[in-house]
Amino acid sequence: MPQVAFQDSRRYQVLPQSPEEAGYYSYGTPGSGAGQHAHPRMLTFLFWLEHRWSATDARRIGIGNISLADGRRFFPHASHRSGLEVDIRPMRKDMIRGPVRYFDAHYDQAATCKLVDLMWQSGMVGKIYFNDASLPRVQRLVGHDNHLHVEVIA
């Protein structure tokens, strides 16, 4: 597992930026990890999730916004200040590392459902927002057509 340095006054760490051996890739604004300051519990969840996912699927998980340094307001988010919330892209059928909405042709609903199931299996998740109402245990929320908003319990 890559070593990470403390990055802000909360002693939160930046998610390692898309290491080649990892089962995830990074995206989000601002770039270069500036929006990926994570509570230690979040890092534990993400590393657990990518490890479990990699054992069953060659596609990488897209991990986006978490928190800015020091928990400052993160426009346009109303949340993402605690380091315990993360945006994760739904899975695509075409292996492209890019956004996809749940109603697009390249959206892989079965794989996204498998990813959501893994999230719940971690025992670390409190809520998941995503607008594909056919997925179990996700809640709809305006603005969540192209990513899952996952809240980790501290």
Image (cartoon, rainbow, N blue to C red):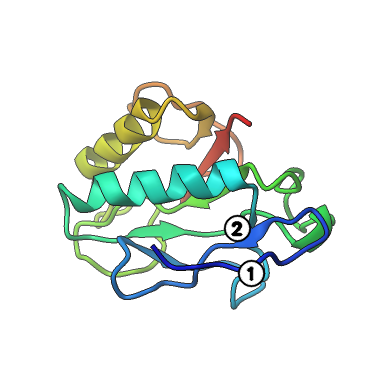
Q: Secondary structure at mark 1?
A: loop
> Which quadrant of the figure has residue 143?
top right
Three-letter amino acid code at the position of disc 2: Asn
- Left/right of residue 86 with respect to residue 71 in the rendered view: left
- Left/right of residue 115 with respect to residue 18 in the rendered view: left
- Left/right of residue 18 with respect to residue 78 in the rendered view: left
Q: Mark 1 or mark 2, which is nearer the start of the sequence?
A: 1
Q: Tell me what residue is drawn at x 29 percent, y 50 percent.
A: 51
Q: Which mark is residue 65?
A: 2
Front residue of 127/83: it is: 83
Q: Is residue 95 visible?
A: yes
Three-letter amino acid code at the position of disc 1: Thr
**Quadrant location of the N terminus in the rendered image:** bottom left
Residue 69 appears at what percent x and percent y? Answer: 77, 62
**Label 2 neighbour load within 10 Å: few <14, some 14-19, many 20+:** many
Q: Pointer 1: what residue?
A: 29
- Left/right of residue 89 with respect to residue 60 in the rendered view: right
- How many numbered discs? 2
Residue 152 appears at what percent x and percent y? Answer: 56, 34
**Quadrant location of the C terminus in the rendered image:** top right
Q: Is residue 102 visible?
A: no
> Which quadrant of the figure has residue 136?
top left
Front residue of 130/52: it is: 52
**Would you say the residues marked 2 and 1 are in contact, meaning their CB atoms lie under 8 Å apart?**
yes
